[in-house]
Every structure is written in C-alpha cells, then in structure tokens.
Amino acid sequence: MPLTPEQLAEIEAARQTPRQTLRAVSEGMEAHLYRAHPVLDHGFIRVIDYMGDDAAIVQAARVSYGAGTKHVQNDEGLIRYLMRHWHSTPFEMCEVKLHVKLPVFVARQWIRHRTANVNEYSARYSVLDREFYIPAPEQLAAQSVVNNQGRGEVLSGEEAARVLDLLKSDANRAYDHYEAMLSQDGQQGLARELARMNLPANIYTQWYWKVDLHNLFHFLRLRADPHAQYEIRVYAEAIAACVKDWVPLAYAAFEDYRMGGVTLSGKAIAVVKRMLTGETVTQETSGMSKGEWREFEGVWG
C-alpha cells in the first residue's frame, strides 16, 4: 500500500484546510496538491508545493526581453517562441516540490539529474519498511541483443516463474537479515547505517525533490520517452500529467517542440534538401555513419 490510513487522513485534512493567498495559483495544480498518484507496486508521486504558472513564464520573458516581444500576439505565442528558440530562464521562474516513493535502483538513475534539490529518507536514522519492487510479469524481459542498456523479449513460463521467485526470496531473505542485525535482543544491535548495506536495490526509499520547470522539462524529455527504462518512465509519466495541468500552455509547447520534435544534424539537413530535389540518397552517399543513418531513417518512419 503506497500510503498508510494515517497518511491518507493527513492529506485529506490538508486539502480541506485551504488558505487565502495573493500569490499566483494554478487551478490545475491545486487539484493535485498533496494527493498521492500511485506508481509501480508500492510507489507514488505527490505534489507538495509549487510556484508560478504560465503567466509567470510570460511575465519573466517580458521583463527580460522587453520590446523584443512586442510582436508576439499572445501569451501562448510567446511561450511557444521561447520553447522553439531554446530559451531557459523564463521557464526557471516556475518550481515544483515533489514527494516521491521509489525503488533504490530507480533513485540511483534519477539522481543523475543534478539540477534539483533532493532530501532523501535516511536509513542511518530510520528503519526502512519491508517493501520491494517486484516487476509485473509483462515487465520481465531478457537482455536486448542490440541495445546494451535495454530489454528484449519478455520472459515466460518456467523462466519467468524462476526469476520472480528469486527476486522475492532474495529480497525477503536480505530484509530478514537486516532485521536480525538491528535486533537488540541480548545484544546492542548493529548500527542502522551499517545494517542498511545488506538491503537489495529494489527496496523502496523516499525523497523530496524540488526542481524548476526548465530542468523538469529536460528530465521529462529523457525519462518520459518511450525508450526510457520502464521503471523510471512511469514516474515521469505521472509527473508529466501533473505538469500538464499546472502549466498547460508551456506543456503543450514542450510536447510539440521537445517530445514530438527532432533535432537534425547539419548532414541530415543537407540530405533532406537533396531529397526534396528528387535525388535518391543512401547511407553510403549521405556522409553519415551507419548509426546516424539508422536514426535518420527512424525519424522518417
């Protein structure tokens, strides 16, 4: 269960005690505030606080660029211009703080995004719960033969059952030993900061993660991509759903120019120009490597 009954009651109490404010408020984000959105088997994401909205992006841009934006007809057009031309600071005016519960191995991948403020649950001070991420059967896949960082065919039958049994038994055995080392029954017990080293990477941890919108969009562009690892992608997708309600104009521009767009190299643009004249271009005549050509063909479907 992602949240205890006590935590759920605390969330409902917070949501039933609104406070008057003069700051910018996003009605879409208010609907998400404090509520837990389940992710994986025991995880969740929660919006704890936020600052700014679409208007804050526009306000910052017009202060920065002044008369340079006078030809933009409306807020949506300005936001799309900023996104299209890779401006960053106006989007940094918006921030969000999230409470995330996630497996340790996902956290280690997530923490590579070093442009956020993070405070993690400390197993030096507290005892971690017996909660482990166990993949659903459809997520048990073999190693990809073409991508060293990806998955291949889904396991089935006896092999899938064997892997699931290993994951469950190893995780519980490690936690049993963790509890035994912490035990003070007849002895002092091992320090929590040492006992935690025996825990598996699929145990759940929690953290508060605060990030500005510009860097959050970068996170989502990488982690909500269909090629991203499933276990972090589902977190990115849950966050994206909140962001879409928070800053709908900015998110629409992000979807169009970042998630739905591509960046072409100089060689690729030259090939496109040749193709538009009716020329047949192959990898050998394109000036691209085989890998570049394969990615270029992927853009054109």
Image (tube, rainbow, N blue to C red):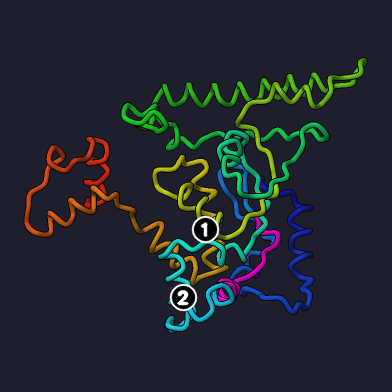
| Rendered residue at 22%/40% (across/down) | 288
Name the foreground residue: 76 vs 3.
76
Q: Is residue 15 left or right of residue 101?
A: right
**How many numbered badges does the structure rendering display?**
2
Which residue is found at the position 16% from the left and 40% from the top?
Answer: 283
Residues in magenta, as a range: 46-60
Please name the residue that numbered disc 1 is placed on. Answer: 240
Query: Mark 2 sits on what residue?
Result: 78
The percent position of residue 276, horizontal first and vertical second, equals 12, 59
Q: Give the image location of residue 118, x and y in percent.
A: 69, 46
Residue 84 in picture, x, y percent from top left? 40, 65
Report if residue 230 is visible in the image.
yes
Residue 156 shows up from this direction: no
Q: Is residue 142 above or below residue 70?
A: above
Q: Is residue 264 magenta?
A: no
Question: What residue is drawn where x is 46% and y is 52%?
Answer: 221
Image vertical order of residue 186 relative to residue 138, above or below: above
The x, y position of residue 106, in whole percent, is 57, 38
- Could you tell me which secondary element the residue under label 2 belongs to? helix
Type of residue at label 2?
Answer: Leu
Instruction: Locate residue 278: give its quadrant.
Output: bottom left
